[in-house]
Image: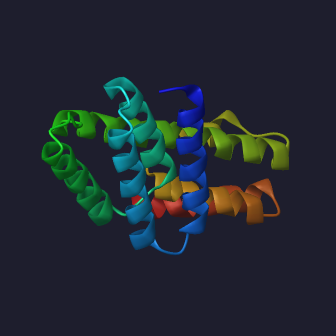
Amino acid sequence: MGNLSRLAVVVMAHLKTQETSNSNIDRKKWKLYLARYLYERGYKRDDMIQLLKFIDWIMRLPEDLKSLFWQEIKEYGEGKQMPYLTSLEQTAMKKGMQQGTQKEAQRLLTQIINIKFKSVSENLIEKINDITDTDTLEILHHQAILCNSKEDFESKLNNIISKKS
């Protein structure tokens, strides 16, 4: 498939992510539609995996719907007698996506506090880099935007860390 077709899938995933921001059920339906589209258009396996990784990353779902999504993809691929992502590939992809999302969230949070508070200690950056939960990093991202001082942000960070311990 050409680059234009790949771009169309990427743009559609982005638009449908925005459109379904208030409905995980609708998001799962669109995510499934896009995945089926990849099967039906005859994308090569490697291209499909890369596009599915992107779709999975941008169209985040709660765990229960994510599991249901992957089960439906597996069944769809089997019904069409097409290769699908094996359970091992799904697990590896999910782990890779989580690690990639975590690293990106850490990087963006560090960037925000560096821009907003000018000087940031290595200790603070280490604390951020020790956080592996992306939901916690998202909370801290919002706190970084809302806090008026570096000290206020550090206080919120320390409170969150102490609650997690």
Q: How is the image coloured?
A: rainbow
Left or right of residue 122: residue 6 = left
The vertical placement of 24 against 39, above or below, is: below
- Residue 127 visible in this rendered orientation of the protein: no
Position of 102 relative to 64 (above/below): above
Is residue 136 rendered to the left or right of residue 148?
Answer: left
Q: Residue furthest front?
A: 41
Residue 40 pos. (x, y %): 34, 42
Counting from the top left corner in percent of width and height, residue 47 is at 41, 28
**Left or right for 48, reference 88:** right
Estimate the x, y position of residue 151 in percent, counting from the top left: 75, 57
At x 53%, y 43%, the residue is: 9
Q: Residue 7: image x %, image y %?
A: 59, 37
Nearer to us in this view, 62 or 72: 72
Q: Residue at x 55, y 68 (%)?
A: 21
Q: Residue at x 39, y 46 (%)?
A: 37
Q: Is residue 24 above or below residue 4?
A: below
